[in-house]
C-alpha cells in the first residue's frame, strides 16, 4: 500500500482528461449493460437485504456508469476553480494523483474487469475532488465546485464495498496531506470568509448544482 501511494506523486504536469475519456470510451457505448456490473449490483442488493428487480438493477447500473463518466468533467471544473482562487499548484498535485491512479492498471480493482475495473478509479478521483471542495468551504464559507458529490460518493462506497473502500479512503487522506492543500486554503481564508459558513455559495456566487436524484437507489440498498 505504501509503495503504491508513493508512486502516485511522480508526475508534475497539467492533467489531460483524454486518458480517462479514452479508457471509458474503450468499454463501448452501453456501459450500463455490462453483465459483470449488473451481477455486482444484484449481489450488493442481496447483501443489503433489498430488492434486485431487473428495473432496479437497470437504474442502479445507469447511476454507476454516469458516476464514472462524470470524472473528466469534474477534473476540468477542478482545474478552472483552482486557477480562479490561486490554488493551481496544490490542485496540480491532486490531479497528478488522479491521473496516476487511472494509469495504474493493477490498482485496488484491476482495470481489466470492464466497468467494474474503473469504479475504484472514479471513486478515488471524485472523493479527492469533493474533499478539496469540503475543506475549501470549511475554511472560506464557499463551495469550490458547483456540484456536491457527497451523496453519490456515499452510494458508490456501498457498491465497491470493503476492504477496497478503506484502502481508497486512505489514499485520499494521504493525497490531501501530500498536496498541502489544507494549509494553503487556511492562508486564503480571512475572518470574514470563515464567518460565512452558512451561506450556500460558490466561487460563482451560487450553491452547488447538479445534485443527483438518488431516490431510485433505495430499492437496492445504496442509500
Image (cartoon, rainbow, N blue to C red):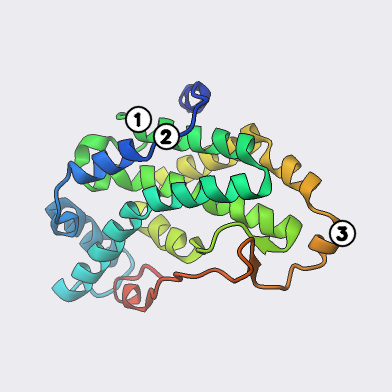
First in residue order: circle 3 vs circle 2: 2
Residue 196 tag number: none
User: Relative to 217, is 165 above or below?
Assistant: above
* Along the line of sight, the residue nearer the viewer: 15 or 23: 15
Instruction: Specify few, some or many for label 3: CA neighbours under 10 Å numbering under 14, 14-19, or 20 or more.
Output: few
Answer with left or right where residue 107 lies relative to residue 15: left
Q: Quadrant of residue 16?
A: top left
Instruction: Specify few, some or many for label 2: CA neighbours under 10 Å numbering under 14, 14-19, or 20 or more.
Output: many
User: Quick one: SS at disc 3?
Assistant: helix
Q: Position of residue 100 (x, y in %)?
A: 42, 30
Q: Nearer the viewer, mark 1 or mark 3?
A: 3
Measuring 42% from the left and 56% from the top, which residue is drawn there? 157
Q: Position of residue 83 (x, y in %)?
A: 60, 44
Measuring 44% from the left and 52% from the top, which residue is drawn there? 74
User: Quick one: SS at disc 1?
Assistant: helix
Q: CA distance from mark 2 to mark 1?
A: 6 Å
Residue 103 tag number: 1
Q: CA distance from mark 3 to mark 2?
A: 35 Å
Residue 99 tag number: 2
First in residue order: circle 1 vs circle 3: 1
User: Relative to 11, is 63 above or below?
Assistant: below
Instruction: Specify few, some or many for label 1: CA neighbours under 10 Å numbering under 14, 14-19, or 20 or more.
Output: some
User: Relative to 204, is 16 above or below?
Assistant: above
User: Quick one: SS at disc 2?
Assistant: helix
Measuring 47% from the left and 66% from the top, which residue is drawn there? 151
* Along the line of sight, the residue nearer the viewer: 34 or 204: 204
Q: Is residue 163 visible to the viewer in this orientation of the structure? A: no
Q: Is residue 176 visible to the viewer in this orientation of the structure? A: yes
The quarter in which the C terminus is drawn is bottom left
Tell me whether circle 2 and circle 1 mark residues in contact (CB < 8 Å): yes
Residue identifier under label 3: 191
Amino acid at each position: 500500500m505504501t509503495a503504491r501511494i508513493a508512486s502516485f506523486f511522480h508526475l508534475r504536469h497539467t492533467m489531460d482528461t483524454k486518458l480517462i475519456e479514452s479508457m471509458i470510451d474503450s468499454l463501448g457505448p452501453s456501459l450500463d449493460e455490462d453483465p459483470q456490473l449488473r451481477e455486482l449490483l444484484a449481489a450488493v442488493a442481496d447483501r443489503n437485504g433489498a430488492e434486485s428487480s431487473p428495473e432496479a438493477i437497470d437504474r442502479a447500473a445507469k447511476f454507476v456508469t454516469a458516476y464514472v463518466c462524470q470524472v473528466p468533467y469534474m477534473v476540468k471544473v477542478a482545474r478552472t476553480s483552482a486557477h480562479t482562487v490561486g490554488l493551481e499548484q496544490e490542485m496540480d498535485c491532486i490531479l497528478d494523483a488522479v491521473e496516476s491512479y487511472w494509469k495504474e492498471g493493477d490498482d485496488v480493482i484491476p482495470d481489466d474487469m470492464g466497468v467494474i475495473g474503473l469504479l475504484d478509479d472514479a471513486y478515488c478521483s471524485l472523493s479527492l475532488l469533493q474533499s478539496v471542495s469540503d475543506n475549501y468551504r470549511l475554511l472560506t464559507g464557499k463551495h469550490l465546485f458547483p456540484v456536491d458529490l457527497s451523496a453519490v460518493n456515499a452510494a458508490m462506497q456501498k457498491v465497491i464495498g470493503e476492504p477496497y473502500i478503506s484502502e481508497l479512503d486512505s489514499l485520499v487522506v494521504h493525497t490531501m496531506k501530500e498536496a498541502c492543500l489544507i494549509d494553503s486554503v487556511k492562508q486564503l481564508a480571512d475572518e470574514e470568509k470563515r464567518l460565512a459558513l452558512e451561506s450556500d455559495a460558490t466561487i460563482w456566487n451560487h450553491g452547488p448544482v447538479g445534485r443527483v436524484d438518488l431516490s431510485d437507489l433505495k430499492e437496492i440498498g445504496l442509500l
